[in-house]
Image (cartoon, grey):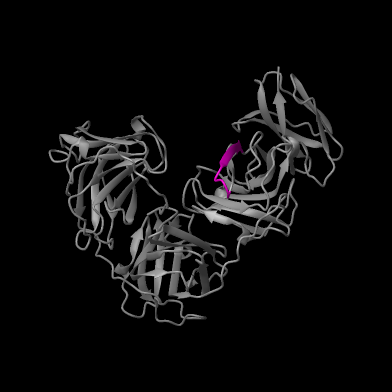
Amino acid sequence: MKSILFFLSLFVFSFGYSQSLPINFESSVTTSDFINFDGGMSVVVANPSKTGINLSDSVGRMVRDSGQIWGGSKITLSSNLSFSVLTKLSMKVYTTAPIGTVVKFKLESSTGSGSAEVNAVTTVTGAWETLEWIFAGTPNTFDEVVFMFDFGNLGNGTASSTFYFDDVAQVVGPPAPSLLSLPLTFQLGEVSSDFLDFSGAVGSVITNPQISGINISNKVGEIVRYGGDIWAGSKIIFATPISFATNWVISMKIYTTAPVGTRLKLEVEGSPGIVTLDALTTQTGAWETVTWNFHNQTGTFNRMAFLFDFGVVGNGTATSTFLFDDIEQLSGPALPTPLPATLPVDFESSVISSDFRNFFGGYSTVIPNPQMVGVNTSATVGQFVRSGGQSWAQSKLILSDSMDFSSKSSISMKVYTDAPVGTLLKLKVESTGSGAANEKDVLTTVSGGWATYEWDFAGDPPVYNVLTFMLGYGTPNTASPTATYLIDDIQQTIPGGTLNIESLTKEETIQYYPNPSTDRVNFSSKEEKIASIVLFDVLGNQVASITPNSSRTSIDVSNLPNGIYIAKVTMQNNSALRSIKLVVEH
């Protein structure tokens, strides 16, 4: 299951009658039984494709049109579902949406207490298929079934946002797992069926094949990832929910031959929803102790999921195999209180990792600069990683003072990413006092190199004291290089300032004029020769390029429409020296 934390407030104007499973839409369930929310609209219709595995006369149909990425419909049941014997839900689905479309099945309580959700993905298009969701171990407290087709995307009302479904039923699945307790040593009779596997991972209890170093136990847990999804993993259910009020560190011994730096995501589920933390391996081919610090996390949690090597599709080999043991809660160190930052921020001294506040799968840290090239040879930079969670994954920096945009209306920042040109970089400004907020978007013009971008907040009041980074907004949260962003030199500037000035501490090395231009823009370099100039429009499309290998050159813009363009200038040493904003006005 790809675990995603989100909150649904369902404001509806009609209430369906209570039903029971199985649901086949032939008689008992009608359109009025659906409760629609946030852009999902369900009705009962004649089966448009009486073929293959479904010859029924009537089926459900959901059309998703705008609204929210979690738009859907739900039906209230006459009694709570019990998964003590029948541990799976199944449903026939027909859509022309692409293979791999996410279909989320969520269970809720009409009393408003808690929820459970599992994902499935389509494997055909233009034909009926049976999808299944394993809910083994889910408590019998839910009496509402929620259908969310193409979860994570906004519907547009077309055929690819239309889903037919039928024969919703409980069926025989894997045995319900035993309820476990911490500390967990795998020495007290735990068995493989105590793991709930999802999305291509298999968890089991085995004889320790690596009795060495810090772990000489004879039994350990093992997770092997066989294909599936980047978020494949296994989870356990606790007999008594755990709290992080006093013991907020989860400690675990890990053995893998995966490379050093492999991402180990630990996820807990409970009354606050789903909370995840990441850790990175520091050993390969040896046992090590890994910890996750949940300090300041409130609420209780009754499930724990292990998503080892998150962001990579497993292949069943040794590098996709993880042994783990001795899972326990410890008191551990308290996390430092985040301190307000002051602009400009260069990450060389004043801002450290704990000053970031991370939400919805965004993880920001301060690290040694792994890309000391081009316009940024700083020793230390910020790193923002989209690691699971929501499409709006984000990290925040609280500022010591509100930003005054009256004279310097732009926020500029250097960014390095391997994401493709045209990736959306969203920057939001917020107020901790009034709750006011505004956000601006820019698109990347460089992949695999540093570039300076600016977000113009001209006209905004001087009330914002929070910078919220949502880089790569709307792209997959895979924790891969294309979901990783290095950031540096965050400052307020005059619009066009940082795109026209390489550095506040470095003399101008390139001159260009006129700007705005009607026909040609001239460039000259005081130092190295200019190797190339590539011109992009605001959508990230390349519209012109030259390779002068000269200290003086010009580029023709006479045939370009009026508007703003970004010129990526590369010097002869192949360093991406800078990005320049140009205006074309005929």
Q: Say if 264 sits above or below 153 in the image.
A: below
Can the viewer see residue 452 in this picture?
A: no
Q: Along the line of sight, which residue is nearer the eye, 367 or 249?
A: 249
The answer to whether 585 appears left or right of 286 in the picture is right
The answer to whether 292 appears left or right of 131 in the picture is right
Q: Say if 214 sits above or below 370 in the image.
A: below
**How many numbered badges does the structure rendering display?**
0
Q: Along the line of sight, which residue is nearer the eye, 255 or 295?
A: 295
Residue 293 x %, y %: 52, 67
Span colored in magenta: 432-443
The answer to whether 434 appears left or right of 347 in the picture is left
Q: Any magenta on residue 344?
A: no
Q: Along the line of sight, which residue is nearer the eye, 515 or 258?
A: 515
Residue 64 x %, y %: 35, 35
Can the viewer see residue 522 in this picture?
A: yes
Q: Residue at x 39, y 76 (%)?
A: 184
Q: Any magenta on residue 439?
A: yes
